[in-house]
Amino acid sequence: MSNHLSQKFEEIVGKGNVLASEVDRHSYSYDAAVLPPKLPALAVRPETPEALGRVVKTCNELGLPLTVRGSGTNLSGGTIPSVGGVVALTGALNKIIEINEADMYAVVQTGVITAKFATEVAKRGLFYPPDPGSQAVSTLGGNVAENAGGLRGLKYGVTKDYVMGMSFYDVDGELVKTGSRTVKCVTGMNLHGLMVGSEGTLGVFNEIILKLVPPPKASKAMMAIFDDLGKASETVAAIIAAKIVPATLEYMDDFTIRTVEDFAHAGLPTDAKALLLIEVDGHPAQVEDEAAEVEAICKRIGATRIQVAKDAAERNKVWEARRAALSALARVRPTTVLEDATVPRSKIPAMIGALEAIAAKYKLTIGTFGHAGDGNLHPTILTDKRDHVEYARVEAAIDEIFDVALSLGGTLSGEHGIGTAKSKYMVKEVGLGSIQYAKRLKAALDPKGILNPGKITGE
């Protein structure tokens, strides 16, 4: 059967682009989530959009589950394939087709690396704000499939806010076009809105039209240092209550600070109980006014000191340290469980307090960092999955983390998606009616259920 499948797909993508060895199958059986791997039958690497469409059509004709995979950085199991299914790799579909400076949009293939795209856009004097933590390796197709966020989400929004349109393949391999290169477009149904965040369950992306914006004229970054977690979390709420919207407003607890500093040597204060990394941007006069007001709020609530970046090099060093948080924490124990609990911004103090209590209750090491300005925290549990007794406590802690987030009016995911990791919690947030509606929609568009089955709503 395996040889037969290999030959069939070799006719579509070429012999060198069908990966069916034991090593290859294992390589594409998992992603960045802490979930059991599932061995696909094979992986294929289409080099043209037409080949990608034929792969989709062939999988549907044969009833083969199909999972599309960019860089595999997914943290909720969204790119873990089905056993015996096909993995379609988008690495060769990596062309930036157009960057239009006059109309401020770009057209890209799905395998374009996020950071590479942002750099190319910046060379044209424009700005693509979404900046997921994995931007150095994640793909734009994956970002759209998961509706990825990032450090700048507070002010600039997430991926969905920049998708103007796209083309994608339905299960029959037919190309569907939606949206436009124009600023305003209300032609037909908002199918690209439906596709964003669908995690590969409703169609397979071909090309994506992305909105670009002018870059800010000025910015100022600062680090506010606290000797109390509560004061740091109260400061986040106070800044937002003052009607100031920083470009970034990031949080680190004491354990994360020490771990990151040991890893990145960025000059972080290892004696701090918590810190906030804050950046305001915009018109130079606005930046000066808002930076001064933010400093005043931090001091009023109890920051022990505030360090303002003197230049771009100092600013970049601190932000690189923040982006290294997950890598640094992952060195501590064999298993790293990065969660994505998000609450209304005013509930940040309550959520941070709950995380401290949960860590103590279950006797676990939890380092917390994240995008505090938009309520998106990343409690990171450091454990060893081979210790079954401890990991049972981890699973109980995760259940409680999401229960608390939902009780505070929050959500299961601010940017990582649902995948298979969080599908069991979905009914608690959206209710059975929403899940049944989504399943009926899925059944109508994908009658055989071949497109990334089991994700979001479960089996």
Image (tube, rainbow, N blue to C red):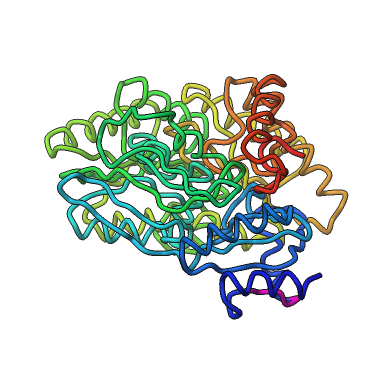
Outermost residue toward the bottom in this view: 16
Q: 17 or 417: which is nearer to us?
A: 17
Residue 425, how many percent across, how many down? 72, 31
Q: Which residues are magenta?
A: 18-22
Q: 435 or 361: which is nearer to us?
A: 435
Q: 377 or 61: which is nearer to us?
A: 61
The correct choice, above or below, for 308 with respect to 19 in the image is above
Specify whether residue 21 is painted magenta: yes
Question: Which corner quadrant of the image does residue 18 belong to?
Answer: bottom right
Q: Say which residue appears at 54% left-offset and 46% top-offset.
A: 254
Specify whether residue 360 is painted magenta: no
Q: Is residue 246 left or right of residue 272?
A: left
Residue 35, how many percent across, how many down? 74, 53
Image quarter where the C terminus lies is top right
Q: Is residue 190 left or right of residue 439?
A: left
Residue 335, how many percent across, how many down? 71, 57
Q: Say which residue appears at 59% left-offset and 80% top-offset.
A: 16
The correct choice, above or below, for 406 with respect to 33 in the image is above
Outermost residue toward the left in this view: 285
The correct choice, above or below, for 286 with respect to 242 in the image is below
